[in-house]
Amino acid sequence: MTETAAPGLAAPAQTDVSHRVSHTTTDWWRSAVIYQVYPRSFADHSGNGVGDLRGIIDRLPYLSDLGVDALWLNPFYCSPQNDAGYDVANYYEVDPLFGSTRDAEELIIRAHELNLRVIFDIVPNHTSIEHAWFRQALLTAPGSAAWNRYHCVRGLGEDGSRPPNDWRSVFGGSGWSQILDPDTAEPTGWWYLHLFDATQPDLNWDHEDVRAEHEQVLKFWFDRGVDGFRIDVAHGLVKSPGYPFSGESDRVLGVADDVPVLPQWDQPGVHDVYRSWRRLADSYDPPRVFCGEVWVSTPEAQAQYLRPDELHTAFNFHYLKTRWDAEHLRETIDHSLATADSVSAPCTWVLSNHDVWRHVSRLAPENPQGNQDLSTGMARARAASLIMLALPGSAYLYQGEELGLPEVLDLPAQSRQDPIFARTDGAALGRDGCRVPLPWTAQPPTFGFNSTGQSWLPQPDMWGELSVETQLRDADSCLSMYRQALALRADESIFNEGTLEWLSSPVDTIAFRRPGRDSVIAVMNLSDEPLTWMAQKLLLASSSQVTAEPSTQNHALGLVVTLAPNTAAWVRE
Ligand code: GLC
């Protein structure tokens, strides 16, 4: 660990972590705020234009000061990087692009010193075509034993020239690629399945090697102290036997779409995998935890993954997809809480991640000129985040959302790297717009991302105004709001457990109480009119400026708080 401060920032002040939960608390994940670090875009220590593990180590004090409880890192294992590291060639080694296995170990140790827990990302649905198993299979005839670890299936028609069924790739195009003869490069009439890019062959989870190997990978990192794993495409591992046609239309599935019940997703056999993983995680002290990426069509289907002997948590994408609509929001929150509760699991709220439009842009309405009204988008995003942080359960923050970064929509075609862009011939822009490197300082060209001026994706000019450095100086900035809300959340025991009680509120607004010794009330104004709310005591936090004046009519009522449209606040009763 270097002692020098990260580029452009003064050495961080000593952090007071005394208010945080102790590292031995075993159910920390039920109410934790977990910060998603997208390593290639977080901080670049080496200066090669791609973020790295040492860059993350440099910035751990920032995360500790922000007030989060844990971090989740997207994959940094050896990979040809055809899908930004979700195409893993070796699960036991760090890709030199990001550092070394020693750096990963040091990151865990340094994070733990700051009372930050660390979650890595496991990618069990598929490997890279450069994984040793796939390379070995390519050297043998299709249908041979080495191919059985993948889905290698004879094509339709006499010569097998048509794919075995109609399964689509999530990234566009067919989910099957033809296996070519290694000597003649002629089609063999056999195909391999890839529900994502052609360089990401799906593994066959009916094969004992596949199950055993992944448990070895989990143990390898658990033994190095990692606190848990986020599970990539957790609902995809097991496929319906016999590869039945799905009847799926020819549309491109976005990863942000609800995945309908199809024979290649959400099959009952997947639950056995997680029962076995849970036994392994529980054998550690403290027990390790899992968060599944489970894109299924209903909260009920998701709850199946959260039964007490399976995964601890799963991202609640139903909340992420909620429209800017008070009724819809209330229903989604209620439905999510009830279904998670039915299996004694906490809800895991999330508004942004590396696969979806950043919520500033998603929530931005169109202005009369047909452009996005980003200032309303920003106000709504702040309000939505403040409400999310008041909900019972845990919350995931995606790097840069604390800065209010919007989606970058005007990246030049030649900079785009997401395979979705290429596989759809540019019809779908893909996910690069939410992966642009973070601005730490106001200093172009790379705004403190590194000191060499290189960046794997270009950063917009507005990044300077949105930088950490600029926002730390402004008590009303988005970053200051997150810091304040997280500090309050850490101090107030009511946020650690318990329930939510809805309060009646005017149309197009929501209000709920988190009951406890000193209840907190969260109010949100989704209407076009100002909302007034009577509060007994303090105004704890707000997403934008709100006015709070003593009631002139009745002093016992305390304050009259006025929230502008697109604003949320936490108050005391
Ligand atoms: C998940 C990841 C996404 C990746 C895909 C394939 O959806 O979040 O980024 O492209 O899986 O691994």
Image (tube, rainbow, N blue to C red):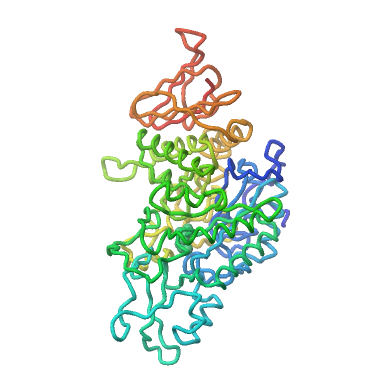
> Eyeballing the image, is 377 above or below 103?
above
Q: Residue at the spot x=34%, y=70% of the render?
A: 174
Q: Is residue 462 left or right of residue 482?
A: left
Q: Residue at x 56, y 55 (%)?
A: 42
Residue at coordinates 39% horizontally, 54% vertically from top-left? 256
Percent across and percent down for residue 457 are 47, 60
Residue 393 in the image, given as x and y percentages of width and height: 54, 40
Classify 126 as above or below 336. Answer: below
Count every numbered label the image shows and give the total.
0
Question: Can you say whether 521 is above or below 355 in the image?
Answer: above
**Residue 560 as seen in the image, left or right of residue 36:** left
Return the residue nearer the eye: 63 or 305.
305
**Split into 4 quadrants, where in the image is the N terminus?**
bottom right
Q: Nearer the viewer, residue 244 or 495?
A: 244
Residue 73 appears in the rendering: yes
Q: Is residue 453 visible?
A: no
Residue 178 location, x and y as percent?
A: 38, 80
Q: At 47% across and 60% down in the image, what residue appears?
A: 233
Q: Give the quadrant of residue 328.
A: top left
The residue lying furthest to the bottom in this view is 184
The percent position of residue 29, horizontal first and vertical second, equals 60, 45
